[in-house]
């Protein structure tokens, strides 16, 4: 799912309106947050009226609007309104993503049914009856996690599927753009998580893994005990002791 990008904090929206209403906001509305295809605009309706507007940028459509009389409102009320608008954008964006994903998954299901058409009767018969032992032994169950990290995340397969099932050029371009952005976002997140996990694993291994090193040196001394003491002094940093490496 996409993230919400905020360009002005909730608490600063009313202050920003007062600061820019006679300059920038007199010329045009400004985007103060984004989420997916949705943008939240701050606009000047009148000198004393602040407007918040949610736009679907892909469809160029207004989704929701609200306004505040700056002489009668507070920072807290405007901040709450911005927070609710961002939550609304997040919910709408998630609905759009899930709807398009589900449509692509249905095309994958249609493909699967075509490939297993001869087995349809056996498959239906098998699913009608409940057999817990068989279910526990089943290795071909496809849960959501397995599916998302399987065919759908293969960008080439998914784009080919879209090209085969969609005829209208506009719809085809819409789904191609969605699939590319959605799959790239999910795979980049997976790669980032895996990279962090791998770095942590290597770090832990380096911390606990002990290495043994052996060096050969020669010390001049009259007997073995004096040689041992001389070597210990050398290892302790006594530069008066000379060794041959």
Image (cartoon, grey):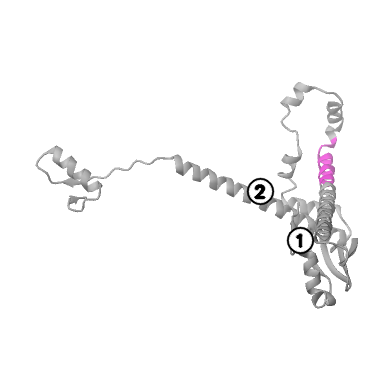
**Residue 66 seen:** yes
Residue 82, by quadrant, is bottom right
Q: Depth check: 165 or 89 in front?
A: 89
Position of 144 relative to 168 (above/below)? above
Task: Find residue 12 and report its horizontal and vertical position in percent.
Answer: 76, 64
Q: Which residues are magenta?
A: 105-117
Instruction: Tally the marks.
Output: 2
Asked whether residue 216 is drawn in magenta, I would say no
For disc 1, the marked residue is: 11
**Residue 63 seen:** no
For disc 2, the marked residue is: 190
Residue 200, by quadrant, is top right
Task: Find residue 61 and report its horizontal and vertical position in percent.
Answer: 90, 63
Of labels 1 and 2, the one closer to you: 1
Label 1 or label 2, whichever comes before in sequence order: 1
Tell whether 103 sits left or right of 148.
right
Tag 1 near tag 2, CB within 8 Å: no
Main SS of the magenta part reads helix
Asked whether residue 112 is drawn in magenta, I would say yes
Residue placed at 22% from the left, 48% from the top? 234
């Amino acid at each position: 799912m996409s993230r919400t990008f905020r360009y002005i904090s909730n608490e600063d929206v009313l202050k920003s309106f007062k600061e820019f209403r006679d300059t920038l906001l007199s010329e045009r509305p400004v985007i103060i947050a984004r989420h997916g295809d949705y943008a939240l605009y701050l606009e000047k309706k009148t000198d004393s009226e602040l407007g918040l507007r949610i736009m679907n940028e892909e469809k160029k459509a207004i989704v929701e609007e609200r306004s505040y009389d700056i002489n009668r409102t507070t920072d807290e009320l405007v901040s709450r309104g911005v927070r609710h608008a961002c939550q609304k954008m997040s919910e709408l964006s998630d609905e759009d993503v899930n709807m398009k994903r589900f449509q692509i998954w249905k095309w994958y299901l249609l493909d699967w049914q075509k490939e297993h058409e001869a087995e349809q009767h056996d498959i239906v018969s098998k699913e009608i009856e409940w057999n817990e032992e068989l279910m526990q032994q089943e290795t071909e169950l496809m849960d959501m996690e397995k599916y998302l990290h399987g065919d759908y995340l293969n960008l080439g397969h998914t784009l080919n599927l879209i090209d085969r099932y969609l005829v209208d050029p506009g719809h085809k371009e819409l789904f191609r753009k969605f699939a590319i952005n959605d799959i790239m976002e999910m795979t980049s997140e997976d790669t980032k998580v895996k990279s962090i996990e791998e770095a942590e694993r290597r770090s832990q291994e380096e911390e606990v893994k002990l290495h043994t090193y052996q060096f050969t040196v020669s010390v001049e001394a009259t007997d073995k005990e004096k040689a041992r003491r001389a070597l210990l002094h050398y290892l302790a940093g006594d530069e008066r002791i000379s060794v041959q490496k």
